[in-house]
Each structure stands twice: as C-alpha cells, then as structure tokens.
Image (cartoon, rainbow, N blue to C red):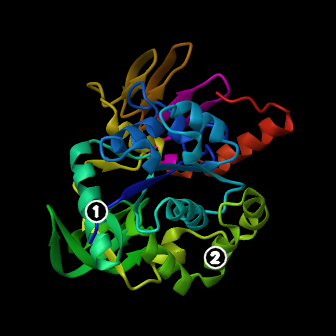
Amino acid sequence: MGELDLHAVVLAGGSGTRFWPLSTPERPKQFLALFDDRSLLRHAVDRLLPLMPPTNIWISTGANLVDAARAELPMLPASQFVIEPEARNTLPCIGLACARVREANADAVVAIVCADHLIRREDEYRALLNDAAASAMASGDLTTFGIRPTRPETGYGYVRYEGTATRVGQHDVYKVAEFAEKPDRETAELFVNSGDYLWNSGMFVWSVRAFFATLRTHQPEMHAQLQDMGSDAGAIARIYPTMERVSVDYGLMERAGNIAVIPADIDWDDVGSWESVWSVWERDADDNAVRGEHIGSDTSKCLIFGSDKPVVSLGVEGLVIVDTPDAVLVCRRDRAQDLRALAEEAFRRRSDKGDTHGD
C-alpha cells in the first residue's frame, strides 16, 4: 500500500430548524457559536487542520449557504467548496463531494464528517481518523464510527457489531451486522443493555474507489448520474436536482456487505437539540444552563438563552426559554426534538411577510 492520502468532506448543509429561533435557514446550526467564540463549523475544520492541508478539506454545502461558509473559513481556497444546487439528502451530496476528491486523487481515502458535532477529545479523534483510513484502504470496507451509548437515546440510530475485532493501530475494527433506525424507548433500553449496539455517529471513512464501487452496485442510477455530471457546473445544475433524495445510511450503508465499525471514544455529541445543549453547558446550583441575563426564582433544570434584555422566570422546571429579536421559544426540554414543524411554520410566515433577513 502506498502513502495514504487522507481527505475530509465536511457536511455543512442545514435548514435552521433544530435551534430555532436562534438558527434560521440563512444561519443554521453549524454557524452558531454555542460553546465558545467559534462556530461549530469552524471547530470542525480546526480539528482537521493538524491532520491534513487545507486543500484536502472539502466543504459540502448549499448554494444559499456557501458565502457564509467561505466567510467562516478564510483558510480554505474557494475551490474546496462543493455546492449543492438544492438539498437532496446526504447520499447525493456525499457522492458529489467524493467525485471532487476523486478528481484530485483517485487513490485517496476520504473521511465524511459533520459540521455540527461536538468532539472534546480532538487528539483521539485525529488518531481514530488515521487508523480508520489505514483500515479502509487495506480492507476496502466502508467504515463508520460508533459511539458507546451512555443512555437509551431515542434520537440516534444504532449500529450492531459482531465477531472478533481486527486491531488496526490503536483501534479495534468490527464487522457491522445491522443498522437500526431511531428506536422507541423500550427498544433503546434493550440495545443499551445488550452491549452489542453503538450509536451511529454519522461519520464515515472509505477509499474513493471502494465508495464508487459500492455505489455502482447498490445505486446504479445515482452512480451513472455522478459520472455524467463530472465537475461541469452546467451538468450539475441540470442533473443534480433529479437525483433521488436518500440518506447515506438507507441508500448505501444498510444495503452493502462491506461495512465495518470502530468504537470511538472521542467524547462526542451531535448537538441535535436544545436538550443536548442543556446537557453540555455548565449548569448552576439549580441545574439551569444560562446564557445572557436571567432573573429567576424557584426555577430549575431549564435552559435559558437571553439576548438584549433579562429573561425572568418564576416557578418553572425543565423548560427551554430562548429569546431572540425575531421570536421567543418556550417549550419543555423533553419536547425540544419536536421543534421542526413549528420552526418551518415560523419560517413560512416570515417569508410570507417578505422578511428574509438572517440573525
């Protein structure tokens, strides 16, 4: 095996619904600085730069977000941004980005990572990427990262692994027996108690050759469309909107046989809702996570995000309260995963009024 050429594709699309009203279609989650003065997108790229040059980092994003992404990442050349004409779910956008990597080096290995994840153990993350790349190049497997579950989470998909591990560098690599969709509470408890399931992190590593060979087998029409498009902007604008809307999990990973998983101990969170932010932010003696000015009495287990005025609370527990110039959100913390429909309705009403400004 020759010298390994590792690239990374950072998935940076989004509709802005998960962290409404702080996020909007013009400023979805990855552009928010939720934990310090850097956005989640900037964190995602900064984690990769010690491992590879800027010309090996590719940002997959929508036409409506590319200007904001370029402004956020001035260290990346404009050529590194792979622009979707419209959102078609994760498999088409990954295919488009992998085609760009293949043009740079057909023998490359590529990591597919997300712009909006929180990863605290960054050195271990980079070691994991290196070992996963070596494993993927040697085996031809499509490799995913699994997170050992700490609770019966119903908001994540799961991966069941089997057999004896192969040791690659510092990490164990297992064959995947099953991908499981987001379960109900009872099923999630069974998964966690069995010890055979990992959370599906949504991060993948594979050789470019293995990806396109597997895609040709299981998604021949999409493979042909990607071949027809190449890097021609006109062809992409014409063909890409006709591609099937399908996720990489359903469209490829659940169908292929050459799938491996590496248990990843990287202190990971997908930061998927205000509930997950509450679990990560530092909390006070009453278990409240607060940003901005808060005046409270008999208030506990709340996430409170203020903007230009105090948020005042009395006699409440387990709420999310987010105040922005555009809207105020009040909901139960355990319902924060269900915001999408309400956020989309708020965006529709704003659009109907002709107000399309961002935050």
- Helix, strand or loop at mark 2: helix
> Is residue 276 found left or right of 359 in the rendered image?
left
- How many marks the image carries: the answer is 2
Say which mark, if any, is on residue 222.
2
Q: Residues within 10 Å of mark 2 (few under 14, many from 20)?
A: some
Q: Residue at x 66, y 44 (%)?
A: 343
Q: Which residue is mark 1?
A: 3
Residue type for callout 2:
Met
Q: Residue at x 27, y 75 (%)?
A: 138
On the rendered image, what quadrant is the C terminus found in? top right
- Which circle, 1 or 2, is nearer the viewer? 1
Residue 24 covered by magenta stretch: no
Tell me which numbered mark, 1 or 2, is placed earlier along the sequence: 1
When asked about the image quadrant of residue 205, the answer is: bottom left
Instruction: Please report the bounds of the magenta region as a residue range.
Output: 320-336
- Helix, strand or loop at mark 1: loop
Q: Nearer the viewer, residue 45 or 148?
A: 45
Q: Is residue 234 above or below residue 35?
A: below
Residue 154, position in %: x, y?
41, 62
> Is residue 355 found left or right of 152 in the rendered image?
right
Q: Nearer the viewer, residue 352 or 204?
A: 204
When asked about the image quadrant of residue 293, the answer is: top left
On the rendered image, what quadrant is the N terminus found in? bottom left
Residue 323 covered by magenta stretch: yes
Q: Is residue 16 above or below residue 39?
A: below
Q: Nearer the viewer, residue 188 or 139?
A: 139
Residue 150 visible here: no
> Is residue 199 found left or right of 16 in the rendered image?
left
As drawn, the residue found furthest toward the front would be 2
When asked about the image quadrant of residue 184, the answer is: bottom left
Say which mark, if any, is on residue 354.
none
